[in-house]
Image (tube, rainbow, N blue to C red):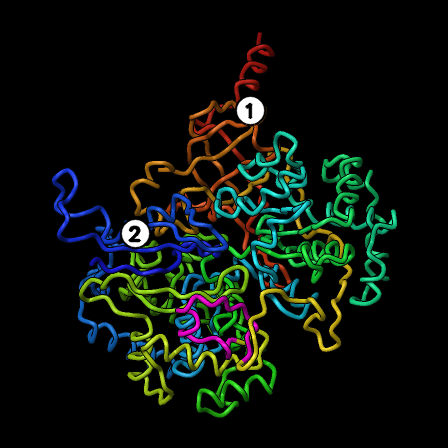
Amino acid sequence: MPRSADTHCPYCALQCAMSLTEPDASAAAPFGNAEPAAPVAVSGREFPTNRGGLCKKGWTSAELLRSPSRLVTPLVRGDDGELHAATWDEALDLVATRLRGIRDRHGADAVGVFGGGGLTNEKAYTLGKFARLALGTSRIDYNGRYCMASAAAAANRAFGVDRGLPFPIDDLDGADTVLLLGTNVAATMPPFIGHLAGAQAAGGLVVVDPRRTATARLTDDGRGIHLQPAPGTDLVLLLGLAHVVIAEGLADAAYLERRTIGLDAVRRSVAPWWPARVQSITGVPATTLRDLARRLASGGRTFILTGRGIEQHVDGTDTATAAINLALLLGLPGRPGSGYGTLTGQGNGQGGREHGQKCDQLPGYRKITDPAARAHVARVWGVEPDELPGPGVPAVELLGSLGRPGGVRALLVHGSNPVVSSPNVAAARQRLAALDLLVVCDFLPSETAAVADVVLPVLQWAEEEGTMTSLEGRVLRRRRAIDPPTGVRDELWVLAELARRLGCEARFDTDPELVFEELRLASAGGLADYSGIGYAALDRGEAAYWPFPRGGSSTPRLFAERFEHPDGLARLVAVSPRTGARPAPAPDELTLLTGRLLEHYQSGVQTRHVPELVAAQPELVASLHPATALRLGIADGETAVIENARGRIECRVAVTTDIRVECVFLPFHFGDDRSANLLTSDAVDPVSGMPELKTNHVRVTAAGGEAPAAERAAGTGAAA
């Protein structure tokens, strides 16, 4: 019988359930082919998130397992500047020797680690432990800093805990109203839209986005409403909604009195944001604002969900906080059939930030500055608390220090592609080039691997065992379906081997289940307590939502009785737009919006190796409104130059009415000179460290360098 494994999709945090089945070797190959296109067949599996469905990325995910570009041997850069095959001993000995030398000359914090939100819980946990014990460095952070940092910071200060969805995703099925802020779920996690059918049927799907996305079109035909505010005005829009809720007496007074503090300050902060003023800034009609506030407060089953569109800004934490304030004013968090949540993007974006990849955290979502937390984790690791380094610095600051005096001289990259995904990426590339040593663990040749000194080939999703944590805080089993290529190693083994070579006496297990058992101990008593979760229960299909303490039970719904602050109360936090936080565009500038396409994922390393997905979206294409394109003299399909002080891109243009006239949209999945992040800013939110990825200003011109047609015509007339 062919081998089969039940597992989950390797892409987004929806973590759709799928089954992988090896083809029957005895069966005849179709059409005379010597072998199937992929080593396993993918089928959707019934599960609450996806109900048997998958998106294009999920259906084609197995093609990565036989990609001709697969990394299968360690690579070391030689004196000729090229990468050459090496043995594992040669590569690991070289890395360990170079790391020891750099630490001896420059100190432990001269070595940095950059992780990823796609690593299993076991690998994320081990990477944090490896950084702090084997390397002794505080300089660890991960690409989730570009994804969930602002939402996490806002949730922590409001609720005392950060779990993307504090309720099971199928709670959304019964909603009357769902407010989606800055998320295009129809493209980023298509099976999610099945959970919006109830709100659509009730005419209550509300989508806030400057673009008319596939998600916005779900509101057509009376199924809801699309609000298309000016870019960068989400905070003002949310303050305006809160103003109406308070001014019209729509707030849940009993809930606010019983379950929150901070109402007076928030009342004062929203007082200046009356609907007419909000309309003048956002473009959203005052009547629409009032109608929406009244619907949200109607007493029905209401959810407010945020995404990266409102969070990837220098004021992202405050904007997410304003969304939480609105939810608290309405009494939604913890109310049966209603709630607030944020949509985690990466496959293990939730688990990846809970167990030690973030610069300020220890396993279990513990603060690294908390003496009790340090003592607990040190006890599990068999070291003294003072052997653990203190807090490090967030990703943008970490990358900005590369190669500088007093900064990081060697960087280990796991499950990330900062050469494409970093803001102001030209500057990030310069800093990476200034390193003494760059080591990349990956299974495909990313743009970051291409500039590394050492590349270590590791397992990918269907070749490994482990766990992932979905956007709803549910811990899931990833199961091995096929054997990896000869020469490829598990990252757990790589880290254990490096730790041994570095003389670290701490224990580093290579069996994922043993690592998870240690993770359970390290997380026990923390906010993200996994101590009651085990592989055996997960393999039986038991639902396990953290916190799940040993001897306790799963927690599918948070906040039913209390929030996670010591007094059990949620914090309403007054926020307001900061003067100068985001300068206005010049008269000849457009606002650049960035985002995802249905066919691609993150920096595109995986999806750009799948022929079907590449054929559907082969190149970077900019979206412009017809009026803007006419003014600029750029026709549909022509090439434009998009530039600012940070960088320059040339790409084809698609003319569409789905975007506001003052905007241009670029997807961020492409590399090299087509990376949208050549144009984005590395200015950061002061609370979360999130960079400004969504609203940057650019100039757009026809690639030929000619003046726009209207200007040419005007010039001809003047001369005549």
Magenta-drawn stretch contains 555: no
Asked whether residue 590 is in view, the answer is no
Q: Which residue is mark 1?
A: 626
Secondary structure under the numbered disc 1 in the rendered image: helix
**Is residue 87 toward the left or the right of residue 392 in the image?**
left
Q: Residues within 10 Å of mark 1 (few under 14, many from 20)?
A: many
Q: Which mark is residue 41?
A: none
Residue found 50% across the figure and 79% down from its top: 531
- Residue 15: image quadrant is bottom left
Where residue 618 appears, x then y in whole percent? Answer: 35, 37
Asked whether residue 174 is in view, the answer is yes
Where residue 648 appears, x then y in whole percent? Answer: 46, 41
Mark 2 vs 1, N-terminal side: 2
User: Which quarter shows the N terminus?
Assistant: bottom left
Q: On screen, 518 above or below 401?
A: below
Q: On screen, 385 above or below 624?
A: below
Please state which amino acid type lies under the numbered disc 1.
Pro
Which is nearer the eye, 586 or 43?
Answer: 43
**Nearer to us: label 2 or label 1:** 2
Please state which amino acid type lies under the numbered disc 2.
Ala
Where residue 378 appears, x then y in whole percent? Answer: 49, 88
Which is nearer the eye, 321 or 395?
Answer: 321
- Residue 283: image quadrant is top right
The part of the chain drawn in magenta is: 530-549
Where residue 66 appears, x then y in whole percent? Answer: 23, 52
Q: Main secondary structure of the magenta part?
A: loop
Q: Which residue is mark 2?
A: 62
Q: On screen, 642 above or below 264?
A: above
**Is residue 296 toward the left or the right of residue 420 in the image?**
right
